[in-house]
Image (tube, rainbow, N blue to C red):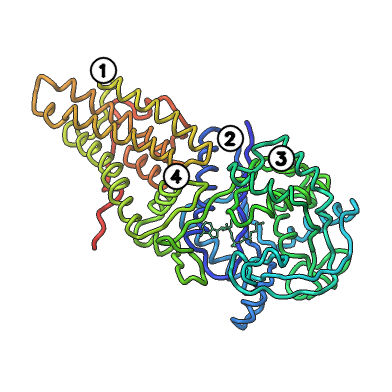
Amino acid sequence: MSRYYLTTSIPYPSGEPHVGHSFEMITADAMARYRRLRGQDVFFLGGLDENSQRVSRSAREEGIEPQAYVDQAAVRFRTAWDLVGVEFDDFVRTTEPRHLQTVRAFYQRVFDSGDIYLGRYEGWYCVRCEAFYGDDELVDGCCPTHRVPPEWVEEDNYFFALSRYQEPLLELYEQRPDFVWPESRRNEMLGFLRQGLKDFSISRATGGWGLPLPNDPSHVIYVWFDALINYITGIGFGQPGGDDLFAQRWPADVHVVGKDIVRFHAIYWPAMLMAAGVEVPRQVCVHGWVNFAGEELSQSGGHVVRPAEVVERFGSDALRYFLLREVAYERDGDFTWEGMARRYQHDLGNDLGNLVLRSTSMLHRYLDGVAPELTNLTSQESELRAAEQTAWEVAAHQYENWRFHLALAAVWRYVTAVNQYIERTEPWRLARDDARQSRLRTVLAMLMDALPRIATMIRPAIPQTADAIEEQLGIVGRPAVWGDDGGVIEAGQQVPGGPPLFPRLDG
Ligand code: MSP
């Protein structure tokens, strides 16, 4: 069985997770679920970036200890991911002892390679993005991402000799054109690489919150150096008994990250791995940002939409569907309440929900809920089969390429085709005509044939709905496999049916 190891970035624990963060987790979760349906042995890792300076500042502002602060945050973040159906196989909190073990082992290997040295840092530091900036990178004297003035830092720091890796990285990009995806981000990184790389500081002499530097505990490890290592902590690197898991899982198939942190993943991290003599990941996959009605969704901008608010009004799958359907992965997208309501009502309620409701209700009304045999097929059924075939193929291709919006559009074309099949075959007329009972049975059998397939096609995106459909069809617990060849509901089987999947919302 082929293995697939994917990771999300690990957010900072300050504040509340918002819909923008959940985009990354939901898309990665949809990919993990899709790969499982394809029979792959998937390992899906998430985590929380708990050693940042921001943590100690926020904790101080709230008058609590940093550890208490991150413990509370970890509950908040994990609850938010549970709520939107994101199921990690493991979750690394960077304050965990196992992470410290991995960081120490990794650091030692980089240190032994001679790529770490003591130097002096003078420059700007933005605590919000935990990044160092040169004068030339500031915009009007402010951090280019957060538009706030950075702090001037002058201190002795340990450095990582990133500049030595310019050539090896260029070679990597040359040999593996899909190392960074999409291509626009690859080009951005290539441009950055070609300008030449500066060594970067991997410790802070300010002490305080963070992991101690193994060879000089008066320093704490720079948060990005420690955070990136989470990707190997989760699979046992440098931990007692962890070698087998690490050998099985590494290199990661994909690190999923947002557009603002590509440089850390596509340049710093592979260079660190090369220095440690560890293989680099197969791909860094970059998504755009979700804005709120055209404006940045941020704590500071005031537009914070929390996943919980959306789930409360529309349900978890509706949020997942909206984000996956509405936002083209590599571009920026927009969250609006109107758009959310529209997708809920049209796509989920009218198209999908009604299809399931009217199919199962007709089966109850005309055949006491007992599935008939699928025989006597006509060209109408062949046409529907062709639409189904196209949906499997197109959706597979698009899911594989992170184009969830196109995958779902393809599935919805099939949903529409099934709805049109009902309009054309008019089972309610057939039911009134004694001579056409056999045709009625074929049509209803065809619908019972289609619904389990739709459940599988939507499963990566909206798993609770897939479960609910299977429950209404009486096929709970069947092993769902992508592209299965039907016959899931057997003739003579009782189909329970159920309430509307996406009831109309008041107000
Ligand atoms: N802690 C670092 C990541 C370390 S990974 C070793 C960090 N944290 S973050 O909380 O600022 O961002 C976490 C992820 O959320 C990033 O991939 C970032 O791009 C993503 N997003 C933050 N706001 C977002 C939107 N509005 N929309 C989509 N993704 C967004 O960076």
Residue 40 disc label: 2
Q: Residue 296: where, in percent of width, then height?
A: 48, 63
Q: Residues within 10 Å of mark 4 (few under 14, many from 20)?
A: many
Foreground disc of the pair 3, 4 = 3
Q: Residue 359: where, in percent of width, then height?
A: 24, 36
Q: Residue at x 48, y 41 (%)?
A: 403
Lower position in the chain sequence, tag 2 or tag 4: 2
Q: CA distance from mark 2 to mark 1?
A: 36 Å
Q: Residue at x 43, y 62 (%)?
A: 292
Q: Residue at x 46, y 72 (%)?
A: 302
Lower position in the chain sequence, tag 1 or tag 4: 1
**For the residue with label 2, is its CB less than 8 Å from the closest atom of ligand 1?**
no
Residue 173 disc label: 3
Q: Residues within 10 Å of mark 2 (few under 14, many from 20)?
A: some
Q: CA distance from mark 3 to mark 4?
A: 32 Å
Q: Nearer the viewer, residue 389 or 293?
A: 293
Q: Which residue carries the number 1 mark?
A: 379
